[in-house]
Structures are given as structure tokens and as C-alpha cells.
Image (spheres, grey):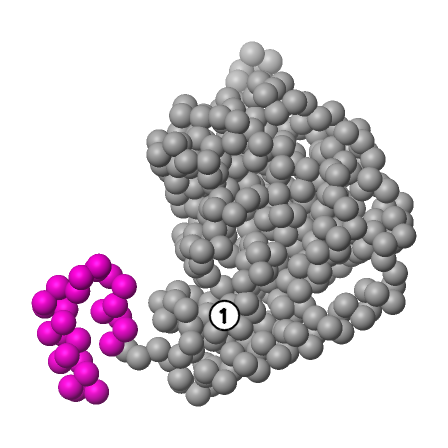
């Protein structure tokens, strides 16, 4: 063939670096040593964060020490509160997974391995700030002290469900706690968060928004619409991309994470961007605080890619052993966020293995008690659900006459 003859074109289809029976090569993660990333001032230009969008902000080293310029000033009580919220989240998840297998609820989604992201982020925000989460940020609610009984009633869709059975289990909604209604249609949270943040600025308020999506959702149009509006109007919003490596059964490279980081998309759109170790509680808190301060000082949005790993199944309808190595989480180089924070507090002399064991026992008792209390109002097994005529409520401020007639007809026929 003539050397000048064009070669046939071909597409590149990304492949995961591990499959069942073949250990994952995590070399693609682009790791960096703890403490190596510089910490720019909050007024830094978005272009000045390009290096941070391609590297990895880490604070905790292998010995549990906090090193580098991103190390936050948190006292022992704050660290222990964060650890407790993470453990409650993990133990709560485990109990609810069992309840789903017992057919007490129809569906559940864990955040196993990702607890530090939601908990530390929540601690860095203020009352009144609004989060627009996905279905894997239950730690936001738990860190803000939302009663476990209320959360479980929502999961059970029972008579005491605060959402009256109108949402799938785990699709929480709690405006009073700064937790916007979860949508099962992913990426919608980003445009909603940007819109809410713009409204806050228009009103001259002081509250900021925090939107959440996963790595797979960055391939959705809503992601690009959101970052465009956030950039143009300097919306006071934090845009969180939780890169847990897998979107259901699709590896993160399918969404574009193979040759570039997800954080780098923010820099390209004129937004300050960080790539952070999502299993490092201190790094999560510090980066969240930095982004929140930028937003509060009218310096615009920040996009943060949280590098973590979905340790469990995508949901109770998923079997991850079909598409990835079963021991991936044990081999993930960023480790377990709970164990890493415990190691840090122990290194400070403010924690011990005995305290950890005792705390876990106390939380187990707390979660079991909350579950029993919630089940008094019904489970999926006994069919005790909110009355059917509640479908007419909470739609209009004043119920129209035709709906009042329909509701009355329904009651008479029941």
C-alpha cells in the first residue's frame, strides 16, 4: 500500500483496567503524595487551579498524620463528631441492606466507602445552604442530625413516611435540613443547584448551593448546561462530581475519565476546579471549606472531583461481581475513609481501638432501636402505607373544587 494512502479510521472504546478474575491496575488514578498540592488563596483565578484539577489534594499520609497546606484546623471534638457520623452512615446502610433482603423495603442504595465525602462536606457548610444530592449522599442528612426514624420511615414508605409514599426509597427530601428532593434522573441536580444559587444571589441572600452528581452523569447535557450558567453568572455554588469509578456497570472512562480528569472540565469552562482524595476526611473538609468561602465572597463557583470507590453494589438490584473484581475495594489505593480518620485521631492521642469498638456497639443499638420504632408504623410486608386520598394533598396551596370532589368520591368508594 502506498505510504500516502490514508489508513482506515477506527474508534477508541475505553476499557476498564480490571475485570472479574483479573485484578484492577489502579495506575490510572494519577495519585499524588499527601501534602504535595499547593493551596491557592480563595480569590485565585480559575486558570490558576489547572494544576490542582489534574493532581490530587491529599492531607492524611500513610501514618495518619495531617501534612501540607490543606490541613484544616479541626479540634478533637470535631474529628470525633465526623467519625461518628461516618460510622452511623455505614452501620445504617448495613442494617437497611438487610431490611431490603428481608423484603421490608423495596430498594436500597449504599454509600459504602464514600462516607467521608458527604459528612465532611456537610460540616464545612452553614445552616441554610442547600444541597442538591444524588441517592448516595445520605451522610449529609446524618451529619446534620436528621432523626434516623424519619429516614427509615421514608425507606419503608409506611404510614409515617414524611413524603407520604411519593418517592422511591432513598429519594429523601428535607428542605429544613438543606436537602433538596432527590431525583432519580441524574444530572438534573446540577442545573437545579446552579439555578437556586443564582436565585440566592439575585435576592441578595448569603446562602450558597451545593450540587452533586457521579462520574457517569458528567456525560449528560445537564452537566454542561450547569457549568456554563455557573461560569457566566458566577453562581455561588459548589459543583461536586463523585468519581467512584463506576456508573452502574459502566467504567468511568466511558464518561471521559480516561485521558483527562473530570475536574479539568471545570477549568476549561472558566471555573475554579479541584481534584481531591475523597477518602481523606481532612482533605474533603478543607476543599469544601475553600470552595464555600469562594462562593460566599462572590468569587464564583468551584467544581470538585472527589476520587473515591463504590465499595458495594450500585443498588440492591445490582451484582458488581459480574463486571469488576470482587476484591477491588480492598485493593483500592486510597483505602477506607473510616479507618484513615480513626488512624489520624489515634495518632493525636484522642482515640483508641477500645473507644472505636464501644462506639460501634452504641451505634448498632441506636440504629436497631430506630428501625424498630419505624417499623411500628408499617413495612412493605404488611402494606401499611399512607392513605390513598393523600395524593390530592400538597399540590396546590388551595385545593381546587374539582380535586375536592374527586377526593370525596374516592373516600366514598373506599
Q: Is residue 309 left or right of residue 231?
A: right
At which x and y percent is residue 358?
A: 81, 70
At which x and y percent is residue 328?
A: 73, 55
Task: Give the extent of the magenta segment.
Answer: 389-414
The main secondary structure of the magenta stretch is helix
Q: Is residue 126 left or right of residue 66?
A: left
Residue at (84% x, 65% y) in the render = 355
Q: Where is the C terminus found, in terms of image quarters? A: bottom left
Residue at (52% x, 37% y) in the render = 238
At which x and y percent is residue 380?
A: 45, 81
Residue at (48% x, 74% y) in the render = 153
Q: Is residue 405 magenta?
A: yes
Q: Where is the N terminus found, in terms of image quarters? A: top right
Does 299 sit above or below residue 363?
above
* Element carrying mark 1: helix
Does 140 sit above or below residue 53?
below
Does 377 sit above or below residue 326?
below
Residue 251 shows in the view: no
Residue at the disc numbered 1: 150
Residue 177 shows in the view: yes
Q: Is residue 380 magenta?
A: no
Amino acid at each position: 500500500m502506498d505510504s500516502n494512502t490514508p489508513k482506515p479510521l477506527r474508534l477508541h472504546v475505553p476499557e476498564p483496567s480490571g475485570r472479574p478474575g483479573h485484578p484492577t491496575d489502579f495506575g490510572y488514578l494519577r495519585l499524588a503524595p499527601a501534602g504535595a498540592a499547593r493551596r491557592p488563596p480563595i480569590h485565585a483565578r480559575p486558570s490558576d487551579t489547572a494544576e490542582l484539577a489534574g493532581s490530587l489534594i491529599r492531607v492524611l499520609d500513610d501514618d495518619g498524620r495531617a501534612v501540607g497546606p490543606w490541613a484544616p484546623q479541626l479540634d478533637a471534638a470535631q474529628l470525633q463528631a465526623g467519625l461518628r457520623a461516618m460510622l452511623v452512615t455505614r452501620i445504617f446502610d448495613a442494617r437497611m441492606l438487610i431490611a431490603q433482603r428481608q423484603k421490608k423495603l423495596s430498594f436500597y442504595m449504599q454509600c459504602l466507602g464514600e462516607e467521608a465525602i458527604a459528612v465532611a462536606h456537610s460540616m464545612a457548610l452553614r445552616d441554610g445552604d442547600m444541597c442538591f444530592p444524588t441517592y448516595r449522599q445520605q451522610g449529609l442528612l446524618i451529619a446534620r442530625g436528621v432523626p434516623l426514624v424519619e429516614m427509615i420511615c421514608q425507606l419503608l414508605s409506611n404510614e409515617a413516611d414524611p413524603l407520604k409514599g411519593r418517592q422511591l426509597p432513598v429519594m429523601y427530601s428535607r428542605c429544613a435540613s438543606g436537602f433538596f428532593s432527590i431525583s432519580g434522573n441524574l444530572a438534573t441536580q446540577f442545573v437545579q443547584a446552579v439555578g437556586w444559587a443564582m436565585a440566592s444571589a439575585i435576592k441578595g441572600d448569603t446562602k450558597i448551593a451545593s450540587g452533586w452528581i457521579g462520574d457517569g452523569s458528567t456525560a449528560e447535557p445537564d452537566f454542561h448546561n450547569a457549568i456554563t450558567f455557573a461560569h457566566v453568572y458566577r453562581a455561588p455554588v459548589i459543583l461536586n462530581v463523585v468519581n467512584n469509578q463506576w456508573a452502574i456497570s459502566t467504567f468511568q472512562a466511558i464518561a471521559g475519565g480516561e485521558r483527562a480528569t473530570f475536574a479539568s472540565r471545570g477549568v476549561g469552562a472558566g471555573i475554579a476546579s479541584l481534584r481531591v482524595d475523597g477518602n481523606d476526611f481532612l482533605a474533603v473538609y478543607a476543599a469544601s471549606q475553600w470552595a464555600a468561602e469562594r462562593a460566599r465572597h462572590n468569587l464564583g463557583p468551584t467544581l470538585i472531583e472527589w476520587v473515591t470507590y463504590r465499595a458495594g453494589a450500585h443498588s440492591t438490584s445490582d451484582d458488581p461481581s459480574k463486571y469488576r473484581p470482587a476484591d477491588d475495594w480492598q485493593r483500592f489505593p486510597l483505602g477506607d475513609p473510616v479507618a484513615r480518620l480513626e488512624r489520624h485521631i489515634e495518632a493525636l492521642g484522642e482515640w483508641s481501638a477500645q473507644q472505636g469498638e464501644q462506639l460501634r456497639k452504641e451505634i448498632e443499638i441506636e440504629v436497631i432501636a430506630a428501625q424498630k420504632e419505624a417499623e411500628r408504623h408499617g413495612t412493605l410486608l404488611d402494606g401499611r402505607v399512607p392513605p390513598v386520598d393523600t395524593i390530592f394533598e400538597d399540590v396546590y396551596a388551595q385545593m381546587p373544587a374539582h380535586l375536592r370532589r374527586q377526593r370525596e368520591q374516592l373516600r366514598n368508594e373506599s
